[in-house]
Amino acid sequence: MNWRNLADEILAGRVVQREEALEILASSDDDLLALLDGAFRIRLAHWGRGVNVHVLRNAKSGMCRENCAFCSQAIGAYSGVDRYQTQTVEELVEGARAAHARRAVKYCMVTATRGPSDKDLDVICEAVRQIKQEMQIHVCTSLGLLTADQAVRLKEAGVDRFNHNLETSCRYYAEICQTHSWEDRVQTIRHVKAAGLEACCGGIVGMGETVEDRVDLALALRELEVESIPVNFLDPRPGTPLGDLERMRPADCLRALCMFRFVNPKRDIRVAGGREVCLRHMQPLALYPANSLFTEGYLTTPGQGESQDARLIEEAGFYIRSINEDSVPTEAEPAGALAS
Ligand code: SF4
């Protein structure tokens, strides 16, 4: 496959087929730089060389009653993660100040739960109102399964985006979680979009799924028209059912990112959890397909720190986008046009 030609066809409006996406994942190491070049052509056209930096906040940790097999916060995991109830409004606002100081365009508050209680929602909504009054930062929340009314409440409070990952393909999901279904997750994304929130929805690769499952996840996200796609690489957590799996090879992580870019060319694609430990010295190459990353670590594991991430971005010839550029590309105006 000539990846450059395929990229040009996609930029001209053609849609990648399932077989082509599978071919990306089956490509050889000899072909990796050519594949990255093709993915970069698409990324450059829509996002320029800008990188959206996001900061996560674990607003309620551990004790989740769901049984997602990858998650160290599930009630059945013997993982020793911190356990605490929903943080106070003051703590959440303080977290936003710290994220703002690190040049984050998005601050994402996450709770380990099946879905938010009324009390949790009150706290999150009040925190969002105060954050929006005090500083220029976009707010994302990730609170589990949502009802239609809860999505509307979040929108009215000023939330910009809601995260809820599909995690994997419909076929493989039952192997990963039995306390809720893949369709439950899809329904939450539909509520999010109906309420006028942007949808952030991605998954985790490296959980024992097939390459077909990876492609089916990317295709499902295309069908749902989610604005943002975090691509996580499993960092197997001790004490979880997936704790003994091996980490993915860096080249396979890069192929997965390229596949998500080819299938979802305009989306805000984030190289997410597992970046440092799975990609290792290959991290800078992830910025060719992906236009976004988390800094300052993840929910239960540390990252390499903000100054290292800033160096990574700048030394690779990219730059950290400001909030004024934090838009999702449209037909009329690719976000990359702002950066050029
Ligand atoms: S619902 Fe979220 S916090 Fe709970 S076990 Fe699943 S991934 Fe972990």
Image (cartoon, helix red, strand yellow):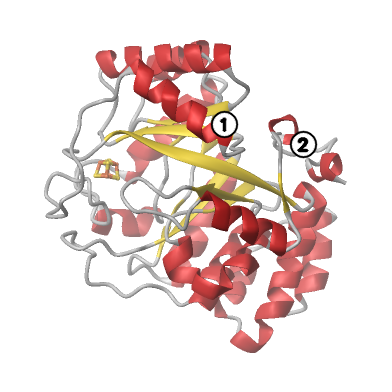
Q: Position of residue 224 (x, y in %)?
A: 55, 40
- Does residue 43 appear left or right of residue 56 in this picture? right
Query: Does the numbered disc 2 mark a residue whose Cβ is under 8 Å from ligand 1?
Result: no
Of pointers 1 and 2, the one earlier in the residue sequence: 1
Residue at the spot x=11%, y=49% of the render?
A: 76
Q: Nearer the viewer, residue 187 or 94?
A: 94
C-alpha span from label 1 to label 2: 26 Å
> Is residue 313 placed above or below 145 in the rendered structure?
below
Q: Tell me whether circle 1 and circle 2 mark residues in contact (CB < 8 Å).
A: no
Q: Position of residue 138 (x, y in %)?
A: 58, 27
Dot 2: element: loop
- Does residue 23 appear left or right of residue 3 in this picture? left
- Does residue 202 appear left or right of residue 24 in this picture? left
Badge 2 amino acid:
Thr
Q: Quadrant of residue 24?
A: bottom right
Residue tagged 2: 330
Q: Nearer the viewer, residue 2 or 116?
A: 116
Badge 1 amino acid:
His
Callout 1: 10 Å neighbours few (<14), some, many (20+)?
A: some
Q: Position of residue 54 (x, y in %)?
A: 54, 41
Q: Position of residue 277 (x, y in %)?
A: 42, 67
Q: Where does ligand 1 appear, by image quarter?
A: top left
Q: Quadrant of residue 244?
A: bottom left
Residue at the spot x=44%, y=20% of the render?
A: 151
Residue at the spot x=54%, y=77% of the render?
A: 251
Q: Nearer the viewer, mark 1 or mark 2?
A: 1
Q: Nearer the viewer, residue 287 or 231?
A: 287
Callout 2: 10 Å neighbours few (<14), some, many (20+)?
A: few
- Does residue 189 appear left or right of residue 112 in this picture? right
Q: Is residue 285 visible?
A: yes
Q: Which mark is residue 92?
A: none
Residue tagged 1: 100
